[in-house]
């Protein structure tokens, strides 16, 4: 049996997911939700989508009457995830939301509650949890190979292009670099330590206040953990090729660089290079989620609850910046 998936929002990333899904074994792309009819012929031709599995944003609720779709993958601009996940849950289908899960923690809670009420599974598109180099770092940390974790230093960013894109408009993006790529550094700090932060401080730097008038350009943030360690993280929309994860323990360390892109991911530890296969992230993610839903494999660490944990930190990052870098206590 395969998990039959419809993609919602046929933009840049949906195209990458669709291409990756050609390699899937347990998940299968069967449907689309699009507001742009001119895209339909190409998707039908490339992926064999049948007319009965094609929806738009107006008739989306009718998907509930379609027994041939099991899950809808929401790949629309950030600030629409909340509304779209609620619509999919109401239609009784499992749902994946792209990151960031929502604009804030309150919305993420509402999404989790709606999916629970509807009896559907809710996941976030955190593809790196399925990526072998990343998994090896987590395995080594859990096995104690780094000893006691002492420090984490993560960075993710790229130079955003077109000044008119939705990513630079708060109403559709929810925020800037922090929302889009800061979540990689932050989520990475959580899987590098295995702890939940208890305080957050953050600072914003803006070198181009015209382009970034509406959203954050570059943010540095620190996470304090119960064991006493601090992770130093950052993200940007204004310089390229900056994606690095670095975890340091009292016995050893690991560094992934590049750490967060579509691959190949490269890593080294105190023992030498990380030798793991380069895989298609999107195919691995979709098969991993399909295995959890269909075959009772344990839920991967990418549930809505994980997305909520990140949004609690994101809220605190923005609050700290608003309060000139004040320490914000969370997860009390
Ligand atoms: P994009 O602009 O290329 O695509 C967005 C799509 O949403 C477009 O097809 C657009 O037509 C559609 N859309 C529907 N309603 C819309 C509206 N009201 N306004 C504007 N567009 C609307 O963006 P993208 O790069 O594909 O990003 C989409 C989502 O995927 C974002 O949440 C982003 O964070 C996420 N993403 C995740 C990864 C990853 O590696 N996990 C990578 C890239 C993007």
Image: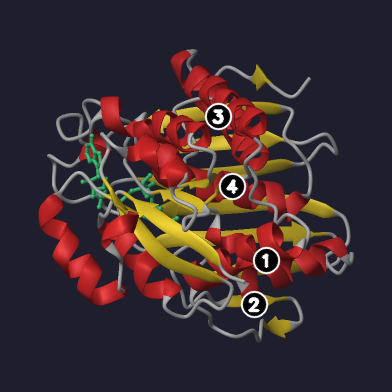
Mark carried by residue 182: none
Mark carried by residue 111: 3
Q: Name the front one of labels 1 and 4.
A: 1
Q: Position of residue 256 (x, y in %)?
A: 58, 69
Circle 1 Cα neighbour tier, 10 Å, few/some/many (<14 / 14–19 / ≥20): many
Query: Pointers 1 and 4 in contact (CB under 8 A)?
Result: no
For disc 3, does the CB lie below 8 Å from ligand 1?
Answer: no
Reading the image, the residue beneath label 1 is: 291
Q: CA distance from mark 3 to mark 1?
A: 22 Å
Q: CA distance from mark 2 to mark 1?
A: 30 Å
Mark carried by residue 268: 2
Circle 3 Cα neighbour tier, 10 Å, few/some/many (<14 / 14–19 / ≥20): many
Mark carried by residue 123: 4
* SS at circle 1: helix
Indicate the quadrant containing the N terminus: top left, top right, bottom left or bottom right. bottom right
Q: CA distance from mark 1 to mark 4?
A: 13 Å
């Amino acid at each position: 049996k395969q998990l039959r998936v419809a993609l919602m929002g046929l933009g840049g990333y949906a195209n990458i997911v669709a291409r990756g899904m050609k390699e899937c074994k347990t998940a299968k792309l069967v449907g689309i939700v699009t507001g742009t009819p001119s895209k339909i012929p190409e998707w039908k031709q490339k992926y064999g989508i049948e007319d009965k599995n094609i929806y738009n944003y107006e008739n989306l609720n009718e998907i509930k009457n379609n027994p041939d779709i099991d899950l809808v993958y929401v790949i629309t601009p950030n600030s629409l995830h909340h509304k779209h996940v609620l619509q999919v849950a109401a239609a009784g289908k499992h749902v994946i939301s792209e990151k960031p899960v929502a604009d804030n923690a309150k919305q993420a809670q509402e999404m989790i509650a709606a999916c629970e009420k509807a009896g559907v599974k809710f996941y976030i598109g955190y593809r790196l949890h399925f990526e072998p180099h990343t998994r090896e770092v987590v395995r080594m940390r859990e096995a104690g190979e780094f000893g006691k974790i002492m420090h984490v230093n993560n960075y993710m960013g790229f130079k955003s292009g077109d000044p008119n894109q939705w990513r630079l408009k708060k109403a559709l993006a929810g925020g800037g670099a922090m929302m889009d790529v800061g979540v990689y550094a932050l989520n990475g700090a959580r899987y590098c330590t295995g702890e939940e932060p208890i305080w957050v401080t953050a600072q914003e730097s803006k070198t181009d206040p015209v382009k970034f008038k509406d959203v954050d350009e570059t943010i540095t943030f620190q996470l304090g953990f119960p064991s006493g360690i601090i992770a130093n993280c950052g993200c940007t929309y204004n310089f390229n090729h900056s994606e690095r994860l670095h975890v340091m323990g009292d016995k050893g360390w690991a560094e992934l660089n590049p750490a967060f892109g579509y691959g190949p991911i490269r890593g080294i530890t105190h023992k030498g290079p990380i030798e793991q296969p380069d895989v298609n992230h999107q195919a691995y993610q979709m098969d991993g989620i399909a295995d959890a839903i269909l075959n009772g494999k344990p839920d991967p660490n990418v549930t809505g609850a994980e997305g909520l944990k990140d949004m609690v930190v994101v809220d605190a990052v923005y609050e700290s910046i608003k309060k000139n870098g004040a320490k914000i206590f969370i997860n009390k």
